[in-house]
Amino acid sequence: ETGVTQSPTHLIKTRGQQVTLRCSSQSGHNTVSWYQQALGQGPQFIFQYYREEENGRGNFPPRFSGLQFPNYSSELNVNALELDDSALYLCASSLGGQAIHEQFFGPGTRLTVL
Amino acid sequence: GDSVTQMEGPVTLSEEAFLTINCTYTATGYPSLFWYVQYPGEGLQLLLKATKADDKGSNKGFEATYRKETTSFHLEKGSVQVSDSAVYFCALASNAGGTSYGKLTFGQGTILTVHP
């Protein structure tokens, strides 16, 4: 069974640029959630995709957007990067989008905005 | 809104010492509660969970009991090992208010260092 994978591992961008992060969900999982983890903080929920539709969103501006594909992999896009966007971005997959469904996390993408 | 508060860290212990990491929460309804562990350079791993009041989650010698009356979910281990050194996160997931998605709300994390 293949776990959750994310790419790239590290990324450096400059302020104002756009970035796309990718996530492959665990085999058989139809739900992907994205989290932002700033240094020294707990992860914060960005949004969740269930069967290719956005199924819930946290307190993040519209320049954070996402997609889920028919194979349930997902992308997180961030436009007009700001310095505060520097963080570890975590993707988690689950079988189902509700609270009782265990989420399995990938290793994350470390984004640095200069 | 939902929130999770963990004890101030970091925590430094000697091997075989007793561990407690406090966690309290605020949520509407009846959330599910979790402890996640993050080893250096890795993503989060689920350590244990409890889905209703008085449930006890346990794994790898760690335990936590869902206490609705005190809104707490403290993590304990009787004898820690050097390999337990990591960051521990308490989290909740709530379906209150008609939400249909499993958003996890995390605490700020507690760094645990165990010395030989």
Image: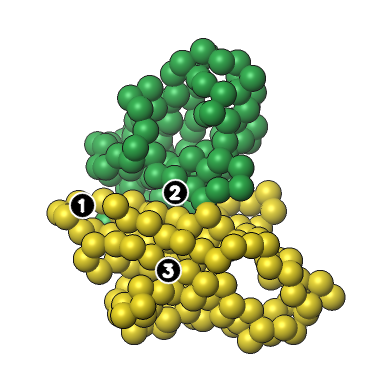
Chain colours: A green, B yellow
Residue under the point 36% across and 78% down: B70
Secondary structure beneath label 2? strand
- Against B97, is B115 above or below? below
- Please provide percent x and percent y for residue B38: 60, 57
Residue under the point 60% across and 19% down: A13
- Against A96, is A59 above or below? above
Judging by the rendered image, the residue that carries numbered circle 1 is B100
Judging by the rendered image, the residue that carries numbered circle 2 is A92
Hey, what amino acid is under mark 2? Ala
Task: Name which quarter of the figure residue B37 lies in.
Answer: bottom right
Looking at the image, tell me whether mark 1 or mark 3 is earlier in sequence order. Answer: 3
Of residues A19 and B20, the one drawn nearer to the viewer in this rendering: B20
Secondary structure beneath label 1? loop
> Which class describes the residues within 10 Å of circle 2: few (<14), some (14-19), or many (20+)?
many
Q: What is the distance, in whole Å, between disc 1 and disc 2 at their CAs?
A: 17 Å
State left or right for residue B112 relative to residue A73: right
**Callout 3 and callout 2 share a chain:** no
Confirm whether residue A95 shows in the render: no
Of residues B23 and A98, the one drawn nearer to the viewer in this rendering: B23
> Which class describes the residues within 10 Å of circle 1: few (<14), some (14-19), or many (20+)?
some
- Asked if marks 1 and 2 touch (Cβ < 8 Å), the reply is no
Judging by the rendered image, the residue that carries numbered circle 3 is B24
> Which class describes the residues within 10 Å of circle 3: few (<14), some (14-19), or many (20+)?
some
**Callout 1 and callout 2 share a chain:** no
